[in-house]
Image (cartoon, grey):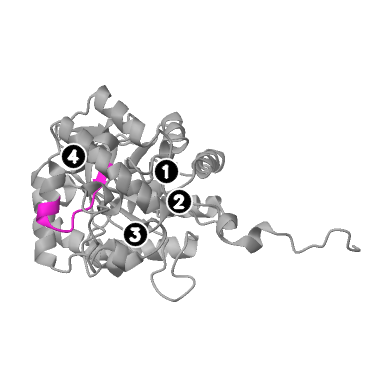
Amino acid sequence: MEFDHLGRSGVTVSRLCLGAMSFGALGNADHDDCREIIDRALDAGINFIDTADVYSRGESEEIVGKAIAGRRDDVVVATKFFNPMSRDPNHRGASRRWIVRACEDSLRRLGTDYIDLYQVHRLDEATDLDETLGALSDLVRAGKVRMVGTSTFPAEAIVEAQWVATDRGHIKPRCEQPPYSIFVRGAERDVFPTCQRYGMGTIVWSPLNGGWLTGKYRSDNTPDDASRFSRLGRGSWRIDSEGARRKFAAVERLAEIAAEAGTDLITLALGFTLAHPAVTSTIIGPRTMDQLESQLRVVGTVLTDEVLDLIDEVVAPGVTIARADLAYEPRALRHKHLRRSSRTIGANP
């Protein structure tokens, strides 16, 4: 297993991070099986685990906490807050009120007295970053959190967070967690350069693009009822969508490239993300032991420039080929009333 510094934090993490989103009721509900997967990952040299309070409504954090109880000091534990945890409108977001409560809840579920990396899961457009960073800084100074980070922030928000932290004397975010894969390359355009400028690490999520880059979705196969196509049925997950058609064609060519390189599609996809100099660690999110083993094969793999050039020909640098894969867009792009004035031109004041 290879390791890298997480930005300028001084903390060293494995280049593969074990993502725990699939542990719990929304993925693998067998706690013993999940613990075996975690044990195998740690034994393989992974020292970095990423989860979130919202994953199976806290169950993922509980599974992770029990699994690492005997070797807590050897594991860098990252979790996140922001998404709704109940119907209460204040049990979500990035306000001081919620951050303090969410942190205490995560500490309890993880069975620990500190969180190594506490991340804002999404940008909260309704909350001043000064409010958010102030609360996170207080948690760091109280010893409950070691580092803070962001997830799926646009480049301009990353810059603003660094400026606010410097101007107000808050703790700076040490890393960003953007989506990144062969099919989702938007981070190359702005997020990666911004993180490099500020000495931030990047922990990339969904390197297999929700299973697309495992090769299990092919144009000549009908997805089964348990697939994401059947469960989501929207955007690029609609089998007849433009995004899906583009992915079907790209997967065929990528499978050929992998075979020509003497490897498999999963290893090609993971190796692609690890090849970018801005990437500190790539999150793998196995639901089963077989999936973990198939992803651990990337350890020690280095893709040649020739192979990376061929991938660039399939999906150009900086391009995300399906709009449904854009994890962040300004609210005004999603809600038309935010981009239309209620005033009538020429009306009396």
Q: Quadrant of residue 173?
A: top left
Dot 4 lies on which element?
A: helix
User: In which quadrant of the rendered view does residue 300 lie?
Assistant: top left
Q: Which residue is mark 4?
A: 267
**Residue 323 bears which disc, if any?**
2
View extreme (right): residue: 348
Identify residue for label 3.
239
Residue 264 seen: yes
Q: Which quadrant, please, contains the C terminus? A: bottom right
Which is more toward the observer, 9 or 140?
9
Give the mark nearest the N terminus, 1 or 3: 3
Residue at mark 1 to residue at mark 3: CA–CA distance = 18 Å
- Most extreme residue toward the front is 220
Residue type at the position of mark 2: Arg
- Percent coordinates x, y for residue 303 in the rendering: 22, 28
Residue mark closest to the camera, 2 vs 3 = 3
Q: Please provide percent x and percent y for residue 195.
A: 43, 35
Name the N-terminal-most of marks 4 and 1: 4
Determine the CA span between mark 4 and mark 3.
25 Å
**Residue 285 colored magenta?**
yes
The amino acid type of the residue labelled 4 equals Thr
Q: Nearer the viewer, residue 250 or 178?
A: 250
- Residue that carries the numbered disc 1 in the rendered image: 320
Amino acid identity at mark 1: Thr
CB under 8 Å between discs 2 and 1:
yes
User: For the residues marked 4 and 1, what is the alpha-carbon distance in whole angstroms?
Assistant: 20 Å
Span highlighted in magenta in the image:
282-291
Q: Amino acid type of disc 3?
A: Ile
Residue farthest to the top, as pictured: 305
- Direction from residue 187 to residue 209 in the image, left or right: left
Q: Is residue 155 left or right of residue 71?
A: right
